[in-house]
């Protein structure tokens, strides 16, 4: 039997979602496969000729296969920095939650500062130069870690407060040292919040465009967001290619999302809010 | 080539804290890098010059990198020079923007090179600082002024105006008798809003010959110089008369060119480099119907001239000699030929051995007339003074959209300019 | 947040020995990266903000840059816009996020699919969204106004209208970020024990009353989180404004971050760094009291 109220609410909800959340992506998707002339109309019409493959290869081949290089660079930056963020911020969150030290207030303040303070770009370039690592992918990794670790720490600190201390006690009784306690006992329990952390941070870092623009000048170091920026003027009469570019750089995040969809909500539930 | 690049990036990603190292053994061909802005013209010319050069010098490989244009790009160029991470060669503006690069400390001085003898002294003065001369022109000289629809002028029996009043009368006739927008505005790309102002400088200089000098010294301001204030009034008058196309606030440069070529707009204030873009986007016939005149002044007019953009060598380059050899090629007849083949003849070359083909596109022919008489052309302000406020384009959009009037726009720009001069550390501000 | 009662017994008897299982050096890797890449440049920015700095040279000039920055004609406009943007986007995300969370935890078909739809914009590159919506919002050829025209409404001039531009960008920011807000809100709702609702239903409370008396007060931690995150994000905002309007038309949609950025582009590095310090102070002054107020029951 169909509940009329449930049906009405569902139909209304889906119509709204269709209008506000599907149409913009439909627009991107349709424009991306159109011919140049049809794309220039910027409407929602059905493609008269499907140029999915042509447009895709045009975007990938543009500027000497810059897209491929960009994908590799972005993947390296994202994977490396997210890994470091997960491990390092879990370590901080762990000790911060478990141990009352005179540093806690100070660290709490620094964490909040990290969320709030806009990074000082030019002094950072100066700093990177002093260290001799300006324009390198690993400096970019370190910067992404520094800019995003605060969020990770907050997430993990809150999550650790949901793990009973009895567990630590038991492990210690069994003879675990600090490293075993953290990596063998705690880490496996962190899966839900870690998934949240990975998804959120990957999105932020993969989609970051301002920082690579300044800390990674040069075509060898181009990242995926910069391709869009670089191609914007090149494609400004070829909207089909512009939107194909948007589509292409959206797909990796879509895949991440499809894989982790279920865990995101559960991670949020157990980590960020309940405490 | 592609694999080595990928490989280098991968190896950089290893979490070892070593800086990037350029590896070059003596057996490999010499690799040079060239940074170009992302405008289609620059990219096409850069690629064409590189291809032509490599054909003659197979042992040299030049890779072209691309950066954003506008102030975004200015910043990238400055940052890369200051941090020693510039490519061997790069394309950049001449004049005031080049002065801000601190050339004596960042660029290779070319004044003693043989090929500089072929380059016109008027050009050399805009890429010089102190004793040094730092650039080579990589395109032709251009003019700033107004493109117009010749067919429409014929149809309505209009004459090419030389005074502002005559120009506005033409607009009134076009507005009254046709559906065509008298003036094309494309504020969606804000830089295009500056043209009525920038291209007016010949007229300013006619009335106030010392303006550039006094302005640089901080003694003359736009808001209280009658001649210079006029440059701000032009766009206000066009806006108040309602002569812009209906979507002038959101349309972009490419839209503007299309409207001009397709006859939707009668006038488009622009630099003559637009000719190449029109040829490229709309084909050879597209510009036959298009003419060009210098911006009309209070009484009579002349052409405000833009010096070509330049190629420079960063002094951090490991291959200065090879880079110089490439510049020698750029500044040669063969270089000019490569340019003309790629983007057509857009204006007079500043390399003395280079001539123009017998037939040039109509707007270019119209522009060349002003070059025949040295009294009818003068350089734009940015080639006479290092002072240029960064907010000019936004201010022009405001005046052209009716948010503020010319007087207050000029006052605002004066403040913008004085801040820039103070930040540059010029004396007298 | 921390409703878990600390185990007093363990603390008292074993605190000394147990402390060593939580070694301080766990702070070290994070601390070093954070310190080197973020803290040192931030502290250095106080010095650099008092210089004329061209990257080639620097000259100490005291507080001149701050004076210059406060004379910036559009500082006031930029400040107002920053607040407008920060407050409208966080208000929008809280209200819409809550509404969507209630909808998405209620009894409808295929909830999971709907949740995914709402969350998806969070994942898309900001600059991609900016480009897309700039085209959708074009007053003449844009899809939004064409759709409005089809139902007889004369659409506004979105990004072109100087009074509307900043709100148009804020609207897109809400669209982009509401998925994350909804997710946090859903998590908050899920944490409310269901027996509260059952007791309320027995007392004959309407759905509306249940929302006001139970849902809203008990999702306070979630609301605090959403407000804090979106307010700080909103005050710092740059990407979307830059991708959509570059602060225009004219200076109409400039925010503090875009003013700073433009000075940076112009090569006024000292001046722009001074702006950075000011933005930092503004965020601290506005956000800290609100954050403190919202989280006051936490510890």
Image: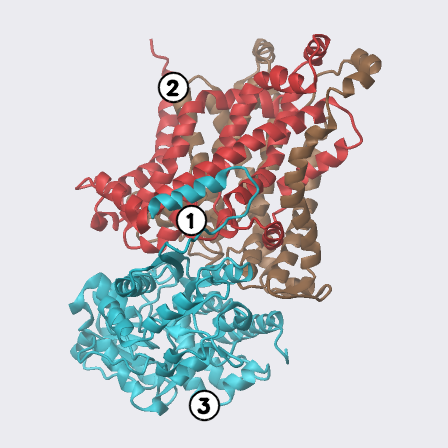
Chain identifier of the brown chain: C
In the rendered image, which residue does mark 1 sit on? A220
Say which mark, if any, is on residue B207.
3
Secondary structure of residue under mark 2: loop
Name the residue rendered at 66%, 62% in the picture. C70
Name the residue rendered at 54%, 40% in the picture. A141
Q: Residues within 10 Å of mark 2 (few under 14, many from 20)?
A: few
Chain identifier of the red chain: A
Say which mark, if any, is on residue C110.
2
| Observer able to see residue A117 | yes
Q: Residues within 10 Å of mark 1 (few under 14, many from 20)?
A: some
Q: CA distance from mark 1 to mark 3?
A: 51 Å
Label 3 resides on the chain identified as B
Name the residue rendered at 36%, 91% in the picture. B375
In depth, the one of B296 and B141 nearer the eye is: B141
Q: Nearer the viewer, mark 1 or mark 3?
A: 1
């Amino acid at each position: 039997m169909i509940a009329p109220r449930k049906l009405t609410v569902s139909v209304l909800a889906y119509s709204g979602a269709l209008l506000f959340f599907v149409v913009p992506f439909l627009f991107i998707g349709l424009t991306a496969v159109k011919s140049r002339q049809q794309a220039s109309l910027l409407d929602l019409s059905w493609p008269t000729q499907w140029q999915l493959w042509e447009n895709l290869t045009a975007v990938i081949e543009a500027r000497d296969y810059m897209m491929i290089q960009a994908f590799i660079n972005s993947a390296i930056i994202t994977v490396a920095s997210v890994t470091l963020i997960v491990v390092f911020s879990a370590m901080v969150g762990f000790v911060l939650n478990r141990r009352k030290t005179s540093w806690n207030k100070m660290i709490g303040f620094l964490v909040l500062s990290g969320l709030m303070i806009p990074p000082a770009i030019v002094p950072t370039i100066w700093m990177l130069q002093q260290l001799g690592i300006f324009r390198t992918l690993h400096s970019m990794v370190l910067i992404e870690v520094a800019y995003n670790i605060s969020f990770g720490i907050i997430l993990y600190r809150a999550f650790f407060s949901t793990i009973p201390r009895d567990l630590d006690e038991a492990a210690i009784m069994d003879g675990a040292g600090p490293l075993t306690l953290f990596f063998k006992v705690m880490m496996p329990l962190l899966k839900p919040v870690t998934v949240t952390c990975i998804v959120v941070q990957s999105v932020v870092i993969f989609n970051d465009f301002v920082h690579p623009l300044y800390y990674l000048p040069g075509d060898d170091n181009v990242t995926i967001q910069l391709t869009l920026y670089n191609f914007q003027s090149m494609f400004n009469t070829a909207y089909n290619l512009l939107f194909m570019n948007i589509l292409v750089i959206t797909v990796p995040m879509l895949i991440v999302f499809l894989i982790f969809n279920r865990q995101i909500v559960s991670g949020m539930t157990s980590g960020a809010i309940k405490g | 080539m592609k694999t080595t690049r990928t490989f280098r990036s991968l190896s950089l990603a290893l979490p070892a804290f070593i800086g990037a190292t350029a590896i070059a053994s003596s057996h490999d061909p010499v690799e040079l890098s060239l940074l170009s802005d992302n405008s289609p013209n620059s990219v096409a010319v850069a690629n064409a010059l590189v291809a032509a050069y490599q054909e003659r010098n197979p042992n040299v490989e030049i890779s072209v990198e691309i950066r954003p244009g506008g102030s975004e790009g200015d910043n990238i160029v400055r940052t890369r020079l200051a941090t020693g991470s510039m490519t061997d060669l790069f394309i950049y503006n001449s004049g005031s923007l080049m002065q801000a690069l601190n050339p004596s400390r960042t660029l290779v001085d070319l004044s003693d090179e043989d090929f500089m003898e072929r380059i016109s002294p008027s050009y050399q003065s805009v890429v010089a600082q102190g004793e040094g001369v730092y650039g080579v022109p990589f395109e032709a000289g251009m003019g700033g002024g107004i493109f117009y629809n010749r067919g429409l002028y014929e149809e309505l029996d209009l004459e090419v105006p030389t005074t502002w009043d005559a120009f506005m009368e033409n607009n009134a006739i076009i507005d009254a008798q046709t559906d065509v927008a008298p003036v094309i505005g494309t504020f969606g790309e804000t830089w295009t809003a500056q043209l009525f102002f920038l291209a007016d400088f010949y007229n300013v200089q006619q009335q106030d010959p010392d303006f550039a000098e006094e302005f640089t010294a901080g003694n003359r301001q736009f808001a209280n110089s009658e001649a210079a204030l006029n440059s701000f009034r032009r766009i206000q008058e066009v806006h108040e008369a309602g002569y812009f196309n209906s979507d002038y606030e959101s349309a972009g440069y490419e839209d503007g060119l299309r409207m001009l070529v397709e006859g939707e707009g009668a006038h488009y204030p622009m630099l003559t480099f637009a000719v190449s873009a029109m040829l490229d986007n709309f084909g050879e016939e597209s510009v036959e119907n298009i003419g060009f005149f210098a911006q009309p002044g209070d009484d009579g007019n002349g052409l405000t001239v833009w010096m070509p953009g330049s190629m420079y060598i960063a002094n951090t380059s490991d291959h200065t000699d090879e880079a110089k050899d490439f510049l020698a090629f750029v500044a040669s007849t063969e270089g000019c030929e490569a340019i003309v083949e790629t983007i057509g003849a857009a204006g007079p070359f500043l390399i003395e051995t280079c001539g123009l083909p017998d037939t040039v596109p109509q707007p270019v022919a119209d522009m060349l007339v002003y070059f025949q008489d040295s009294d009818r052309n003068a350089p734009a302000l940015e080639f006479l003074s290092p002072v240029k406020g960064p907010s000019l384009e936004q201010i022009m959009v405001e005046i052209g959209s009716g948010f503020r009037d010319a007087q207050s726009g000029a006052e605002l720009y004066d403040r913008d300019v004085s801040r820039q001069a103070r930040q540059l550390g010029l004396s007298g501000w | 947040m921390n409703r878990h009662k600390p185990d007093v017994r363990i603390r008292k008897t074993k605190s000394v020995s147990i402390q060593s299982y939580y070694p301080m050096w766990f702070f070290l890797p994070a601390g070093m990266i954070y310190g080197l890449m973020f803290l040192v440049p931030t502290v250095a920015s106080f010095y650099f903000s008092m210089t004329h700095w061209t990257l080639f040279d620097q000259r100490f000039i005291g507080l001149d840059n701050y004076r210059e920055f406060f004379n910036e004609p559009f500082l006031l406009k930029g400040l107002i816009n920053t607040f407008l943007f920060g407050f409208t986007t966080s208000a929008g995300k809280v209200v819409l996020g809550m509404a969507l969370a209630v909808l998405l935890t209620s009894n409808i078909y295929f909830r999971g699919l709907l949740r995914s739809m709402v969350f998806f914009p969070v994942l898309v590159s900001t600059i991609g969204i900016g480009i897309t919506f700039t085209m959708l919002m074009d007053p003449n050829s844009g899809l939004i106004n064409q759709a409005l025209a089809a139902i007889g409404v004369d659409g506004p001039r979105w990004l072109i209208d100087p009074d509307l531009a900043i709100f148009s960008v804020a609207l897109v920011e809400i669209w982009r970020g509401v998925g994350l807000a909804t997710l946090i809100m859903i998590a908050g709702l899920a944490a409310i024990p269901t027996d509260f609702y059952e007791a309320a239903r027995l007392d004959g409370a309407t759905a509306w009353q249940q929302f006001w008396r139970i849902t809203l007060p008990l999702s306070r931690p979630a609301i605090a989180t959403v407000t804090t995150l979106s307010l700080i994000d909103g005050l710092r905002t740059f990407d979307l404004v830059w991708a959509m309007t570059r602060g225009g038309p004219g200076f109409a949609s400039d925010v503090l971050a875009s003013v700073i950025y433009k000075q940076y582009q112009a090569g006024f590095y000292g001046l722009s760094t001074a702006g950075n310090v000011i933005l930092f102070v503004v965020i601290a002054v506005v956000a800290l009291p609100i954050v403190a107020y919202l989280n006051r029951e936490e510890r």
